[in-house]
Image (tube, helix red, strand yellow):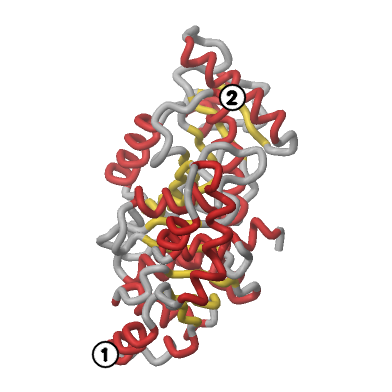
Amino acid sequence: FILFKIPSSTAMQLFDKLSQKAKEHPQRIVLPEGTEPRTLTAANRIIADGLAHIILIGDPKEVLGMAQELKLDHIKYATIVNPADQAVIDRYAPLFFELRKSKGISMEQARLTTANPLYLGCLMVKNGDADGQVAGAMNTTGNVLRAAFQVIKTQPGIDVVSGAFLMLLPEGSPFGTDGILIFADCAVVPDPSAKELAQIAVSAGQTARDIAGITPRVAMLSFSTKGSAKHERIDKVIEATAIAHEMDPELILDGELQADAALVPGVAQSKAPNSALSGRANVLVFPSLEVGNIAYKLVQRLGGVEAVGPVLQGLAAPVNDLSRGAFPEDIYKTIIMTANQAIGLKGL
């Protein structure tokens, strides 16, 4: 899902900033696909650049053998965890059993599941032995998310995991902040309730702070601006806006707004003169997945905008999913973003 072609100046500035923060506060990022060549190539670069402490899951002989074959000199500095090691299973299986015993799981089943690298990585995060996980070069999105949902779960006060895209605008664009807009949810929740939509908005605000490094100005989008139309779908956005204000009173957020009233000061002055956003939103929250997904793809293709994501938000610790067609550069940058999410969750 993470798309990188020729990096724009916005992308270069963003990742320079994220890299510097990652270097100042190194996080422990676990990569469950520890024998996968693209993953190893990205991990080698991360270690060489001093951007994170890398934990690779896989048979140490296979991992080091692949690293030698690929001439990756820094993999020897990674921590390598063997999922077949019974001492490792003994350490983490009881935790998984406690997390899932209410679902009827046996200790034997817990031990078998713990040997699955996706689950083992999440258990390491849950146990405080790692700060975040990146996977998906060899696994489906469903498998990556299932492990995260079952083990890491969501942040306090958040019930839903959603996906945000960082839209990196062409140089000189008048929209967003520092050339960046955040779009959510474009990846996970098909038809969020008002409560879920509010949680998506609060989570997207956190993504704006932790990854984009900007003060969020959140617009709850609809096909109505401040009562210009009446419909139950508009009512959902109005209710979500009220709930989001209750969840995070300090968050600069307004709705319901049409996209032009959210992004264009002149239109905002006419349609929503009392809006706290004043037509300068940098986070756009869409009322449904179909709207968000269509919008980000249209903006990306028609506007020449670089789309980075989806960044998964709402989890108690960061887990990010890769496209199975990801390049090493994509994985490298996803590790950097994941590290910055972990830094943000710690309040560093």
Q: Earlier in the sequence, mark 1 or mark 2?
A: 1
Which residue in the structure is indicated by mark 1?
69
Q: Position of residue 18 (x, y in %)?
A: 55, 66
> Element under label 2?
helix
Q: Position of residue 276 (x, y in %)?
A: 67, 30
**Corner quadrant of residue 138:** bottom left
Residue drawn 31% across the image and 63% down it: 137
**Outermost residue, top side:** 230
Amino acid tagged 1:
Glu
For the question of whether residue 10 can be seen, the reply is no
Residue drawn 44% across the image and 77% down it: 85
208, above or below 257, in the image: below
Left or right of 17: which side holds 45?
Answer: left
Q: Name the foreground residue: 227 vs 126.
A: 126
Left or right of 148: which side holds 272?
Answer: right
Q: Residues within 10 Å of mark 1 (few under 14, many from 20)?
A: few
**Corner quadrant of residue 42:** bottom left
Which residue in the structure is indicated by mark 2?
240
Left or right of 28: which side holds 326?
Answer: left
For the question of whether residue 61 can be seen, the reply is yes
> Element under label 1?
helix
Q: CA distance from mark 1 to mark 2?
A: 53 Å
Amino acid tagged 2:
Ala
Q: Name the foreground residue: 205 vs 203.
A: 203
Q: Position of residue 203 (x, y in %)?
A: 58, 42
Q: Residues within 10 Å of mark 2 (few under 14, many from 20)?
A: many
Q: Name the foreground residue: 122 vs 254.
A: 122
